[in-house]
Amino acid sequence: MAAIAQNPMERRHKILVVDDEVVIRELLVDILSDEGFEVQSAPNGRVALEKLRADGDLVAIFTDIMMPEMDGITLIREARKVAPSVVCIVMTGYATLDTARAAVKEGAYDYVLKPFNLSEIKLAVNNALERRRLTTENARLLEITELFHISETIASIRDERRLLDYLLRAALARVGAKRGSIMTVSDDGRTLRVASSIGLPEDWQDATVDMANSISGWVAENVRPLLVTDIHENPDIVRISKRLKDHSFISVPLERKSAPIGDPGVREASRPQVLAVLNVTEKERGGQFTEGDLKTLSIVANHGAAALENVRLLKDIEDAQREIVFTLGEIVETRSRETGNHVKRVAEYSKLLSRKSGLAIEEAEIIRLASPLHDVGKVGIPDAILNKPGKLTPEEFDVIKTHTTIGYDMLKVAKGRVLQSAAIIALHHHERFDGGGYPHGRRGKDIHIYGRITGIADVFDALGVERVYKPAWELDRILGYFREERGKQFDPDLTDVFFANLEEILAIRDAFPEAEEGRHRG
Ligand code: C2E
Ligand code: SIN
Ligand code: SIN
Ligand code: FE
Ligand code: FE
């Protein structure tokens, strides 16, 4: 495929001279050519505009004011639409000096008076180019600031889908494109999936394509960006991608940054080097993508790749943490002869109550992850007490009560929101709303909301199942108990939330039933 982005060579500045008088036109062409510029000329505004449209490299226009077909003022106005960075200089006689000043108001950079001498022309054009250089630098600075903002934002996104959606939107906005996609490379490196898209048919979302049959696949396999200004000049691409109707597009790879872990000889070596491919097409106003666009997208892709890797790494860690948390919770429940599904149900009840009582989804999720550890301190309770098949003596119950502080002490040193929240839950889940709970006898809203929530979830579940010291309660009895304890043992508002969402609570209970035979639900 021959359509690789080429290095723009240092070229001479191109200037356009517009005048209906042949003599003046040719004089200016000579002067500016001698100065080392590449000069084109046009007899009026209309022709000049055509040349401007055809040649994006023109940096300055010298134009007369009074000309047939299209005058200089109109030309300047139109030129600024076609090529905003082009610098216009007006040539004028004394008779039209006011008009020239008006032209400057229209956006002309300067005017020179006819008849002009050589040094005036040189000065005007050098000033104009200097000004253009500054303007371009400002634009570049602005661009960099924008890119910095994008980079900052993506570093704070923790969900892969949201990251890719933001990245794509930002990329399209930066280069003025209307369609695009981010395709992620599968683990085995054989296929690509449309992970995010804008302006594409909806059923393309999540569609997969073969590496071998797609442009993104070519970019991923060759680890090279692709800038095509006119697809019809690239028959290979037309062959690969019959769907592409647009003439111009850019595809850039999001390259993996991290070194392979483990033995580089085995397996890891086949880990695909490209994580994803960013595609943009349909430049606004039917334009073509430029080298500058490619550079911009390469920067976006570069930062995007780092963020994508981070997000995936974090997710791995969180998955591992989640597993550890559940395993720990299950171990505790197993020791106290409870089943694993107890912690799962408590987790889901807690999340539901969190959401329905108005906590944010992120917080509810943290409570879901943390609540299974509420009884982790039971690992410090002697077996003879924990699994005693009957009623506890007050002394034994005092020992049991320490499971709250033991759990808190175990968890409080851990880093991360989930384990910190778990520490709070361990400490607060046996406090009572009326102040009669343990370990501290906190009252009302002094009990942490996580503790109040998990407390309700825990007791609801504990009552419904058989324990060594008690049979399972019937549902009606449990609900009666909750009505009775509203505002005493339990937060009254949360108790209301509990009753208002009873149907969903029971659906959770049915979804995670007690596995072993001989255990009954209430
Ligand atoms: P658990 O079995 O997970 O019970 C959690 C909470 O559910 C209890 O906290 C209590 O608020 C409620 N609950 C459970 N069963 C009953 C019940 O039959 N009646 C009432 N009114 N509430 C019930 P609590 O009471 O602070 O107990 C904490 C932990 O101490 C229990 O966790 C359990 O492991 C242990 N435990 C409590 N009472 C006894 C007992 O009589 N014998 C034994 N062997 N262990 C007990
Ligand atoms: C893309 O895949 O996002 C660009 C190509 C197309 O529009 O078909
Ligand atoms: C792609 O290869 O990036 C998808 C574009 C297409 O095949 O139309
Ligand atoms: Fe407990
Ligand atoms: Fe429990």
Image (cartoon, rainbow, N blue to C red):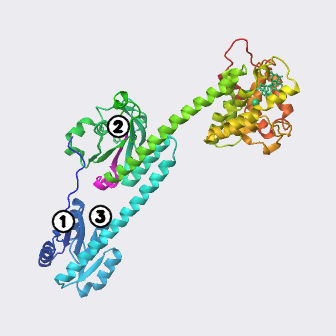
Q: Residue placed at 41% from the left, 31% from the top?
A: 262
Disc 2 target residue? 273
Q: Classify mark 1: helix, strand or loop.
A: loop
Q: Is residue 219 above or below residue 230?
A: above
The picture places residue 87, in percent across and down from the top left corner, at: 28, 71
Is there CB contact under 8 Å for labels 3 and 2?
no
Q: Do we see residue 216 in this rendering?
A: yes
* In this picture, residue 9 sits left or right of residue 213: left
Q: Secondary structure at mark 3?
A: loop
Where the N terminus falls, by quadrant? top left
The answer to whether residue 279 is magenta is: yes
Q: Which residue is mark 3?
A: 83
**Mark 1 nearby-residue class (10 Å; few <14, some 14–19, many ≥20):** few
As helix, strand or loop, the secondary structure at mark 2 comes to loop
**Quadrant of the snapshot with the C terminus:** top right
Mark 1 or mark 2: whose residue is earlier in sequence: 1
Q: CA distance from mark 3 to mark 2?
A: 39 Å
Mark 3 or 2: the one toward you:
2
**Location of mark 1 (residue):** 12
Residue at 82% in and 42% down:
442
Residue at the outermost bottom position: 94
Residue at the right extreme of this rendering? 394
Q: Looking at the image, tell me whether mark 3 or mark 2 is earlier in sequence order.
A: 3
Instruction: Report, in whole angstroms, how far the alpha carbon at label 1 lies from the one at label 2.
Output: 40 Å
Question: Which residues fall within the magenta stretch?
Answer: 275-293
Mark 2: amino acid: Gln
Reply above or below: 477 against 306: above
**Residue 225, image quadrant:** top left
